[in-house]
Amino acid sequence: MAEDAGRRKAAARRGARPARGEGTPGTGRPERGPGTALTLERGWVYAPAPESREIVSIAPEYGLFVGGEFAPAASGKTFATINPATEEPLAKVAWAGPADVDRAVAAARTAQEKTWGRMPGSERAKYLYRIARILQERSREFAVLESIDNGKPIKETRDVDIPLAAAHFFYYAGWADKLEHAGFGPDPRPIGVAGQVIPWNFPLLMAAWKLAPALAAGNTCVLKPAETTPLSALLLAEVCQQAELPPGVVNVLTGAGETGAALVAHPGVGKVAFTGSTEVGIAIAQAVAGTGKKLTLELGGKAANVVFDDAPVDQAIEGIVNGIFFNQGHVCCAGSRLLVQESVADHVVERLRHRLTTLRLGDPLDKNTDIGAINSRQQLDKITELSAAGEAEGAHRWSPPCELPKKGYWFAPTVFTGVSQSHRIAREEIFGPVLSVLTFRTPDEAVTKANNTPYGLSAGVWTEKGSRILWMAQKMRAGVVWANTYNRFDPASPFGGYRESGFGREGGRHGLAAYLDV
Ligand code: NDP
């Protein structure tokens, strides 16, 4: 942001004007069409800086990845995946049914028993390193593809999703030959076949979170990506081929909720890992109960981001913006409830609004874009409905001046003030770029309000007092508490929740436990 401000000042000194085609003459507003970045900043127009799509080649149709090869579904059924920013159909993708689940689990079982499970950890590590290196080498291709299929800005896929996905493979490659030193006893064993169901908000990253620890521990995997974002998982399957991973070690089944349900219920699966909604997580917990399968659930959240009156305001504003507007708010640990100390509330909200007028919403492939498209029509409807409920219940709704592109799924960054704890927007996970602002007077009140949620995934605290950070971190019921930062991830750090946010941890040494028979 400081860099942007610097550039603006330099341009102003040079008397720079928008180049031809950059803006609408006489209005100071940008021209908009599909694929044109829209600046919300008063009076300033950014020239479009689109990343080329050339690097990505999307096939018209994709099969299932089973036993190291791509093949159509047994039923021949397919579904379309679209670009949510333009509604353009991208490809047809195979729809896996029960027969395909059987085939994939059988392939995974054979690979586990005959190859992968017998291989020394030091050999498995080489494959994981190879996958990590290929992800790095093909990172631009992955970043563009993920933006197209998901709608998230290229600067996020390029700087966050893809580097973190590679980092996960690197990190767990390091564990593969050290399992007996990981604190799980002298001879920790793999479970067998892992059935893994992932959501659409971080498609490649969630695949990496699931696959890397499972493979390091000697398991084989059947992965079910989300219906709206299958393409990066299929490209990852190609990377597995490129890395010469033995056939059947990783299998990718595209399909719908039924595919996921058939996978988790399959008797050949020994470990189930799910990230997604609390509702589906509960259904999976019921399906798995009594089967002896190991289960980890990473579900929703309604995190409190708590700002005290001594917080560094500029940093806190960036943390609030990153907390809720990163990835259009499609983040399970999003700081969707801002709790701000009453004495500074007006000031913080004013500064926040000013900051939001500088966000750029539009073409996800434009490198200047801060806010991309909402992932699906269904998700847009949910955000719209919950925001309308916020207004109807009496909260005050505000968005920066913002004209949305005509095609695709878009939602302006939105801030609700005057929110009470009983409002739906303070209780339910919106999973969109919508922030609910509440106030508190004392640290005790902040803790009580922060914990007044059925979830417990994450929280943030902003204050200059180290002792207060430690006190808050102990009191807040959340799996992750960020202090003077937000949405920071590291493969070495465990992540997971309490209560309706699920159980089990992913990442770090803890993440291995879920994939070992310990
Ligand atoms: P879901 O929980 O339905 O989807 C997550 C994954 O589970 C997808 O791969 C989905 O497949 C699959 N799935 C769906 N039903 C079943 C089932 N019965 N058994 C096994 N797998 C299943 O999330 P949605 O995409 O429907 O989003 C709904 C809400 O969930 C969002 O509005 C948001 O609030 C929340 N959510 C939370 C996430 C988080 O990380 N905490 C992530 C995603 C959503 P398919 O895509 O084919 O339906």
Image (spheres, rainbow, N blue to C red):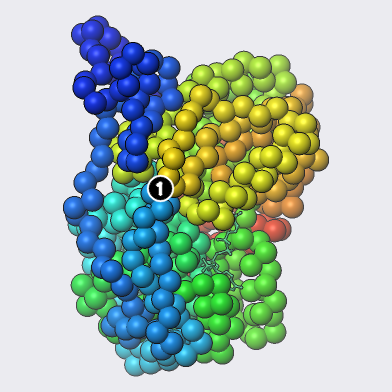
Which quadrant of the figure has residue 119?
bottom left
User: Where does label 1 land, which residue?
Assistant: 85
Measured as percent of width and height from the top left, residue 403 is found at: 47, 30
Which quadrant of the figure has residue 496?
bottom right
Which quadrant of the figure has residue 57?
bottom left
Considering the numbered disc 1 on the image, is that residue within a helix, a strand or a loop? loop
Q: Quadrant of the C terminus?
A: bottom right
Q: Hey, what amino acid is under mark 1?
A: Ala
Mark 1 Cα within 10 Å, few/some/many (few <14, many 20+)? Answer: many
Measured as percent of width and height from the top left, residue 49 is found at: 25, 35
Q: Is residue 235 left or right of residue 218?
A: left
Q: Is residue 338 left or right of residue 444?
A: left
Residue at 34% from the left image edge and 61% from the top image edge: 90
Furthest-right residue in this view: 422
Q: Quick check: 190 above or below 359?
A: below
Q: Nearer the viewer, residue 359 or 440?
A: 359
Q: Is residue 484 left or right of residue 234?
A: right
Measured as percent of width and height from the top left, residue 53 is found at: 23, 51
Q: Nearer the viewer, residue 235 or 20?
A: 20
Q: Nearer the viewer, residue 60 or 192?
A: 60
Residue at 34% from the left image edge and 53% from the top image edge: 148
Residue at 42% from the left image edge and 45% from the top image edge: 407
Q: Quick check: 473 above or below 339?
A: below
Q: Quick check: 148 above or below 448?
A: below
State whether residue 361 appears in this view.
Answer: yes
Quadrant field for ligand 1: bottom right
State whether residue 223 appears in this view.
Answer: no
Residue at 66% from the left image edge and 80% from the top image edge: 287
Q: Quadrant of the N terminus?
A: top left
Measured as percent of width and height from the top left, residue 76 is found at: 40, 84
